[in-house]
Image (cartoon, rainbow, N blue to C red):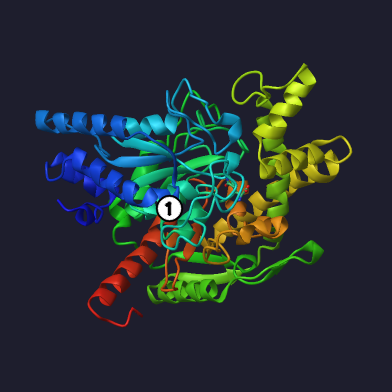
Amino acid sequence: MIRDEIFSFSAFELARKIREKQIRAKEAVEAVFQNIDERESNICAYISLDKEAAMKEARHCDEQVLKGGGLPPLFGVPVAVKDNLLLKGRRTTCGSRMLENYIPPFTATCVQKLQEAGAIIIGKTNMDEFGMGISTEHSFFGPTKNPLDPARVPGGSSGGSAAAVSGDMAFAALGTDTGGSIRQPAAYCGLVGLRPTYGTVSRHGLVAFSSSMDTAGPLTRKIRDAAGICNIVTGADVKDQTSVSCPKIDISSLENAPVKGMRIGIPRELSAETDFEGGYSLAVSPEVKNTLTEAVRILEEEGARVEFFDMPILSYAVEMYYILSSAEASSNLSRFDGIRYGYRDPDAGDLASLYIGTRSSGFGLEVKRRILMGNYVLSTEHFDDCYRRAESARKKLCRSFDAAFSRFDVLLSPTAPQVAPLLGESGKDTLQNYISDLFTVPASLAGIPAVSVPFGNASLPVGMQFMGPRFGEQSILTAARFLEMHQEGRKQKELKGGTGNA
Ligand code: GLN
């Protein structure tokens, strides 16, 4: 089978073709590595790849197919995993010099579940160091580029996972989302990115950034793949006491995307220009605004009830997020001290200089900034003023979401205020970067599920985000599937020589 044809299949379709002996797993892995050979030197989606192990697994899969019998749902599918998810015996760096040569002794639960579902893990993807960033430019291993336009960033921090899937260098990938790191790269790379309800995916083996928000989830080409992978990786895990079981997504009922009668709320704070203290403001670019308008139009046409409403506390979500996530990060990252594992300053003379030397050269600039911020907000002088206030604001935010979900089934907003920026552009103003997370951090703070789906006909991909109540994956994916179906229809019309304005 020719390479392009293999890549026309979604991850679960590919698995079916492999089970039905129409494609061999070996062919699928070879196709992926051919693309990697051609593209990876330019895109840099991966930190490490293991072709030999992948080929060996593929051969094993093909033998199993010949033997017959029941085979798992992702059988033989090449999948990529973000490099902050542990894979036993394979280097896991978190994009940091600190863990440049770290080999973990166990596998993250969510990765293990993918393996048990038959996926072949082909490599570990590039990321902003310890998940801190919006562009994958803050990686010790250099930046990843957007396969759709290599002059642009793929987003971050799961930019490597997004680039791997978008560049046809994997059929699906796992990313992690603390404040938007699955959804925003998905939006920039034209993919579906799903952040499941907090706690439904075990954090065992996910290197901690901000434990109260860290969530692993899929980046895929299609909603169906995201839902299927979500069903595989979710579930309570004894190794993570904050994990919970959850209802499985009914994938077949997503197919026709019944949005008629669905109540959809759009928070005004996430749809127009927002002003912040210190003279900062966040403007939504015209192409993103137009895409939102078009989404509203077609949802209403289909019989959904769409309403703009005020949720004023959302304007403080960025402050809450950066105070709380930095506080948690400064505590979580204290384990990297040169003693237990990871990088150790070779020139240190005594214990104090070992700590200082190791952490000074082991961490990059953005990580140090977060540690300093975290220590500041946790210090005795500022604890009440910053940390405690942010915690109580977070509770208010959760209550506002509860109130919103008593009126609406799902909430809609853009995923990011703009399309993928040019490389180098986002390094200019740190605060402006933080503010650009306004659309994604609210769901993170509230622990609710959110999905980004590519939509519209702007020249570069734009993502629309649906947020739902806890365990509301079915509703957000239904709404997202409706936009996806519309998008598929538009593409088909374009192919047939239509106007593209379906
Ligand atoms: N951009 C956010 C940050 O830098 C989100 C990161 C994430 O979700 N891992 O903290």
Looking at the image, residue 12 sits to the left or right of residue 421; the answer is left
Could one spot residue 124 in this view of the protein?
Answer: yes
Per the image, the residue denoted by label 1 is 42
Quarter holding residue 222: bottom left
Q: Amino acid at mark 1?
A: Asn
Quarter holding residue 285: bottom right
Residue 11 is situated, as x and y percent measured from the top left of the image, at 28, 47
Could one spot residue 250 in this view of the protein?
Answer: no
288 or 38, nearer to the observer: 38
* Residue at the outermost front position: 347
* Residue at the outermost bottom position: 499
> On screen, 372 above or below 496?
above
* Residue at the outermost right position: 381
179 or 199, nearer to the observer: 179
Residue 208 is situated, as x and y percent measured from the top left of the image, at 59, 33
| Number of other residues with Cα within 10 Å of mark 1, as a class: few under 14, some 14 to 19, many 20 or more | some
- Specify whether tag 1 is near ligand 1 (CB below 8 Å): no
Helix, strand or loop at mark 1: helix
397 or 12, nearer to the observer: 12
Q: Residue at x 45, y 76 (%)?
A: 294
Residue 256 is situated, as x and y percent measured from the top left of the image, at 29, 62
Q: Residue at x 44, y 47 (%)?
A: 45
Residue 292 is situated, as x and y percent measured from the top left of the image, at 50, 72
- Numbered marks: total: 1
Quarter holding residue 416: bottom right
> On screen, 192 above or below 382?
below
Looking at the image, residue 221 sits to the left or right of residue 282; the answer is left
> On screen, 141 above or below 203?
below
